[in-house]
Amino acid sequence: MSKQKDVLILTGAGQIGMAIARRVGFNHKIIIGDKNIKNAENISKIMQNAGFDTSFLEMDLSSRDSICNLINESQKYGEISALINAAGVSPSQASIKTILNVDLYGTAVLLEEIGKVIKEGGTGITISSQSGHRMPALTPQEDEQLAMTPTQELLSLEILQPKNIRDTLHAYQLAKRCNVKRVMAEAVKWGKRNARINSISPGIIVTPLAIDEFNGIRGDFYKNMFAKCPAGRPGTADEVANIAEFLMSDRASFVTGSDFLIDGGATASYFYGPLKPQK
């Protein structure tokens, strides 16, 4: 085997994850995990052709065994010093159950398991969503439950039972709210290894998936959202990577357990501007 390097794990083989990995993945062994092995292979090849050292494998975020397998395979190359979690499903892609299993439970398990092995001084980013910021405030007790409940018990919470979830968008909002709370709780644990974990909540970012959405049944909704936000446009994966690169650098050594909303002001417009829902 070649000389061991620090390992960067990228979960979710998409444009945002790749954009971040290209900023911070030099001089790392990059392990790319995705449920769709073809997507993982494609991103791996693109990055290899740009000079990065990558490998890929199938990884199901909803499965603890699959997550642990990814970690075990990654550790064959060196210590895991960085995590970029960009895996997930969208409200128009999946059922309520799948959204909760992948975006909520899976992300919680991934942060937990990586936190057990992250290298001293390591860093992590998980991609949440502006959706988590649009839902009405939960009670302090509900927030604490989302943050602190043992992962194996998370999906048993009353707030996450089908009778209490209106539709896939509501499930997605709950999942993303949980991501942010989970990052806060995990930051305390990661701190014992002098490691840091933060989340980023993007708004509408132009990716192949987003373009499909623009041209689909919810297309007018999305186009109206970015037309009426202060930025007046959707964002790019590299604009998310700008923030992630900072957060994963030594310049952000005092930043952990935080969430960064990157949505061109869409959430501001939703609460206090032209995107505010009409009652």
Image (cartoon, grey):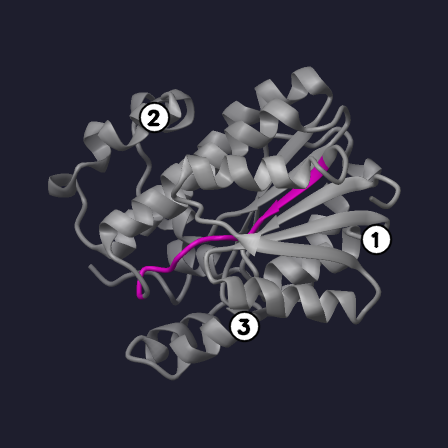
Label 3: element kind: loop
Numbered label attached to residue 152: 2
Instruction: Where is residue 15? Give x, y as percent.
Output: 60, 66
Work out which residue is located at the far front of the displayed protein and give it.
1
Q: Residue at x 40, y 52 (%)?
A: 131
116 relative to 51, above or below: above
Q: Tell me if residue 239 can be seen.
A: no
- Considering only order in the chain, which callout, 1 or 3, is on the residue closer to the N terminus? 1
Magenta-colored stretch includes residue 193: no
Front of the two marks 2 and 3:
2
Q: Three-letter amino acid code at disc 2?
A: Gln
**Dot 3 crowding, Cα within 10 Å, few <14, some 14–19, many 20+:** some
Q: In this view of the protein, which residue sits in the foreground, 33 or 174?
A: 33
267 relative to 225, above or below: above
- Considering only order in the chain, which callout, 3 or 2, is on the residue closer to the N terminus? 2
Q: Three-letter amino acid code at disc 3?
A: Thr
Which span is picked out in magenta?
81-92
| Residue at image mark 1 | 26
